[in-house]
Amino acid sequence: MHIIVTGGAGYIGTHTCLELLTSGYDVTVVDNLSNSCREGLRRVEKLTGKSLCSFYHIDLIDPLATDKVFQHCPDAAAVIHFAGLKAVGESVAQPLRYYQNNLTGTINLCQSMQRYGVKNLVFSSSCTVYGTPASVPITEDFPLGVCTNPYGRSKAMIEDILRDLHQSDPEWNIALLRYFNPVGAHESGVIGEDPNGVPNNLMPYISQVAVGKLQQLSVFGNDYPTPDGTGVRDYIHVVDLAKGHLCALEKLQQQPGAFACNLGTGQGYSVLEMIAAFERVSGQKINYTIAPRRQGDIACAYADPSFAARELGWKAERGLDVMCRDTWNWQSKNPQGYASR
Ligand code: NAD
Ligand code: WQD
């Protein structure tokens, strides 16, 4: 089966392409390389011993270029849509760029899919659509909350657009996968997360302190109503997350329809617990200081992953130590990331 993967050169995309190739899928990647480089996918091909069908260096906001991909892939069965901009702070500073990229890119993609009769879509949504949840764990029927930034709102808007699309034409089969906090890397240490500039997210920040690229981690707030006062999140290994996409593809085939699904572990860890686990597993000391809360942060979010277990037959298998081990393995073997960027 031939799958088109948008944003396949990025962090989650490379890990998903690896799982798809390993499982025997034909894979075509579309990416404008705005937040990635070709090297990740070259390494995926090397690791799997398999080649992509094609790589298209195009931008989804270009409708003609997007159409061409489908013209050239008449046997495409489904699309996994990772392509999007994802930096929360940047989205506050550049809302138009974020809305244009994420919304227009998705609309163009769906229009091309419609024109070429490809109506199976797996979309990268985010737990950010829940806003500040009234309680934890979070189930899929929680109301969609008030997002505190344009990035989060772009995800919530795209979810609405895709639900409308399914409503208008039930031939569309759509999985809205709400990721919690992806971390870690492939166990080989050959591919991993390679953030541009100073990382916004906790785990890459910790690992860059560990490798000596950054001096000190700021822990954003220690006065939250959590056991140790620091923020609690549901960290999920990127390989588990990648495998969730294959389960979603199978589900769409076996039981057509549209659904939203959390991809998380169901277990929350605080910032201090993350630092302690990383230190234990890597043997590196993480220099940190307590800093004020970061604007827009919430105290605590973790998934109820039972819908995914029941409906997709998927469950995260890798625990916190493996997340830290694989992050450190990647970071220590690739201190400059893919470097060629
Ligand atoms: P990433 O930036 O590593 O990957 C996204 C890829 O999309 C990049 O390779 C980028 O070059 C490409 N891209 C962006 N805009 C494009 C466009 N207009 N046309 C073509 N390609 C384009 O990010 P990631 O962490 O792999 O995230 C993948 C998806 O998952 C994103 O949609 C993101 O919003 C979502 N998500 C990520 C997280 C997370 O914490 N990493 C959490 C929840 C949801
Ligand atoms: C985790 C915890 C921070 C950095 C973000 C997006 C969300 C989703 C995942 C895409 C929090 C604390 C962090 C640091 C810290 N992305 N922290 N020092 O905020 O849960 O979610 O990424 O959809 O939309 O908002 O993840 O990794 O930034 O933060 O203390 O330098 O670590 O305050 O408690 P977050 P994160």
Image (cartoon, rainbow, N blue to C red):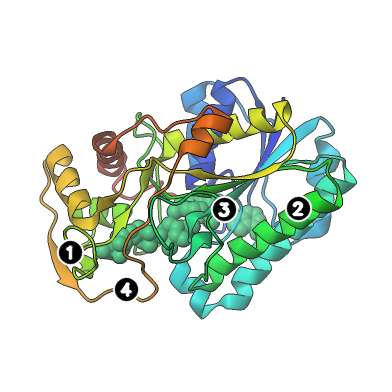
The answer to whether 140 is drawn above or below residue 119 in the figure is below
Q: Is mark 1 within 8 Å of ligand 2?
A: no
Judge: label 4 CB < 8 Å from ligand 2. Answer: yes
Q: Is residue 201 visible?
A: no
Q: Which residue is mark 1?
A: 216
331 vs 261, left or right, is left
4 or 1: mark nearer the eye: 4
**Residue 109 numbered tag:** 2
Q: Estimate the spatial distance between the alpha carbons at disc 1 and disc 2, rounded to whole Å.
A: 41 Å
Mark 1: which amino acid? Answer: Gln
- The number of discs equals 4
| Identity of the residue drawn at 78% across and 44% down | 69
Pointer 3 residue Cβ closer than 8 Å to ligand 1 = yes
221 shown above or below 107: below
Secondary structure of residue under mark 4? loop
Select label 3 or label 2 by which is in front: 3
Q: Amino acid at mark 2?
A: Leu
**Label 2: how many Cα within 10 Å (few below 14, some 14–19, many 20+):** many
Upstream in sequence: badge 4 or badge 1: 1
Q: Is residue 141 or residue 92 the one in the foreground?
A: 141
For the residue labelled by badge 3, is the local secondary structure a helix, a strand or a loop?
A: strand
Disc 4 packing (10 Å; few <14; some 14–19; many ≥20)? few
Question: Which of the two discs, 1 and 3, labels the residue nearer the N terminus?
Answer: 3
Q: Position of residue 138 (x, y in %)?
A: 44, 52
Residue type at mark 3 is: Ser
Look at mark 4 in the image and give the residue it sits on: 294
Residue 72 at x, y percent in the picture: 82, 38
Look at 12% across and 46% down and name the residue there. Answer: 284
